[in-house]
Image: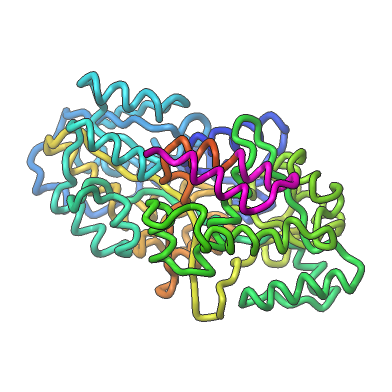
Amino acid sequence: MFGQPTSPRFRAVLAGTLSAGLVFSAAACGDSGDDGDSASTDASASSIDCSPYTKFGDLKGKTVSVYTSIVTPEDKPQIDSYKPFEQCTGVTVKYEGDKSFETQVLVRAKAGNPPDIAFVPQPGLLKQLVATGKAVAAPPETEANVDKFWTKDWKSYGTVDGKFYAAPLGANVKSLVWYSPSEFKDSGYAVPTTLDELKALSDKMVADKKKPWCAGINSGDATGWPVTDWVEDFMLRLYGPETYDKWVNHQIPFNGPESTAAFDAVGAYLKNDQYVNGGLGDVKSIATTTFQDAGLPILDAQCEMHRQASFYAANWPQGTKVAEDGDVFAFYLPGKDASAKPVLGAGEFTLAFADRPEVKAFQTYLSSDTWANTKAKLSSGWVSANKGLDPNNLKNPIDQLSAKILLDPASQFRFDGSDQMPAAVGSDSFWKQATAWITGQDTKTTVDNIEKSWPK
């Protein structure tokens, strides 16, 4: 479905989607439907250049253990994507997916029983794992791949205290707005290229007696996270990546003028009765509407737009065509001007706890353009920021759009802020206070309460 679990928030996303019984139609997204055995066979049988792995010596009969939060059914494309490496080297990759990964990987590392490689979905967790003293720095071959195929922004998230540990793996894009292409065409609406144009478009929709936006933030124990994504997107757009980094790392206070302005900018959309909540209710209905249901009124033209990540593609009903000429598609949430390309997103990183030759060889494979393109041919709902990825290998239009955004040389990628903040803030007070804000709490009280919760 989503392709890459990224956080406790993501597990709530996945569980909620499955419980809602909503199915992502691969055919509707342009997927050929070949995710089964034929695709696996093609990928595993395809020839790759084995020479990058010969320098690690004779690896036949060796085993590398991989531990991750990516579980059934998303695990199959992962496992299949390792076959070319296994055939090249004679290494067996032992895969273990666990829904309790974030908790258990720390337990295992501290107990001296870590896996060879862990797919870590948060920079904050990566830092905690490095702090155990059990993680090892990435080999030079892996770092060379990252320098070649990723931007410095991405490399920085795998770097702790100046030492490079973990190459990026998969990614998702959060800076997207879902809409109906046919509704836009019939109404004469153009996709906006600046924040001012986005606001003007919203006003035009109101003048046309339409509700511009629909939204929902209910996600069980994780209720509130969609608001934090909105705030993070606007912090990044209003103040740029450097200030965003200071905000995430608490180098500027959470109740400073920047946070206040970001909340107020979001409020101009989400707390505006004229703008929301098409097909669902008033402003307060945002807090009670599940995020899975929030965008569905677009299909009935009850609302025009829904800001949500690329993984929302999984929530459209069976048979919905997700494409530029389909029932729904998405556009990039614009920056302050057309040249600014701030991108909010998430992803995983490959952290090793062993420096055996076979582990280094596998890290090098996973950081290569070879693996990225092999994985792309096997998966739907997966993308990477690897610059060697050929977007034509991706399975559906929303993946291709995400890759275009991520691989744009002008893009300034920043990882989800709440996933980097201390848990007491990122997955607690920020979510809860943002929910209270949606239901009527004022901005000052909201940012003051979040600031008070920051660990001393």
Q: For residue 361, which quarter of the picture?
A: top left
Where, quadrant-wise, is the N terminus in this rendering?
top right
Where's residue 8, x and y in %? 50, 34
Residue at x-position 37% and y-position 51%: 249
Residue 317 visible, this angle: no
Q: Position of residue 327 (x, y in %)?
A: 76, 59
Q: Nearer the viewer, residue 272 or 79?
A: 272
In the rendered view, does 322 fall on the left or right side of 171? right
Query: Looking at the magenta stretch, what is its main secondary structure?
Result: helix
Residue at 28% in and 22% down = 108
365 or 254, nearer to the observer: 254
The foreground one among 143 and 8 is 8
Question: Above or below — where is 148 with respect to 6?
Answer: below
Q: Is residue 453 magenta?
A: yes
Q: Residue at 72%, 55% (x, y): give it.
A: 321
Locate residue 57: give its quadrant.
top left
Residue placed at 37% from the left, 55% from the top?
Answer: 251
Q: Is residue 152 left or right of residue 199?
A: left
Magenta span: 432-456
The x, y position of residue 266, in whole percent, is 65, 60
Query: On the rendered structure, is 118 left or right of 279?
Result: left
Q: Is residue 189 magenta?
A: no
In this orientation, does residue 454 appear? yes
Q: Position of residue 52 (x, y in %)?
A: 17, 53
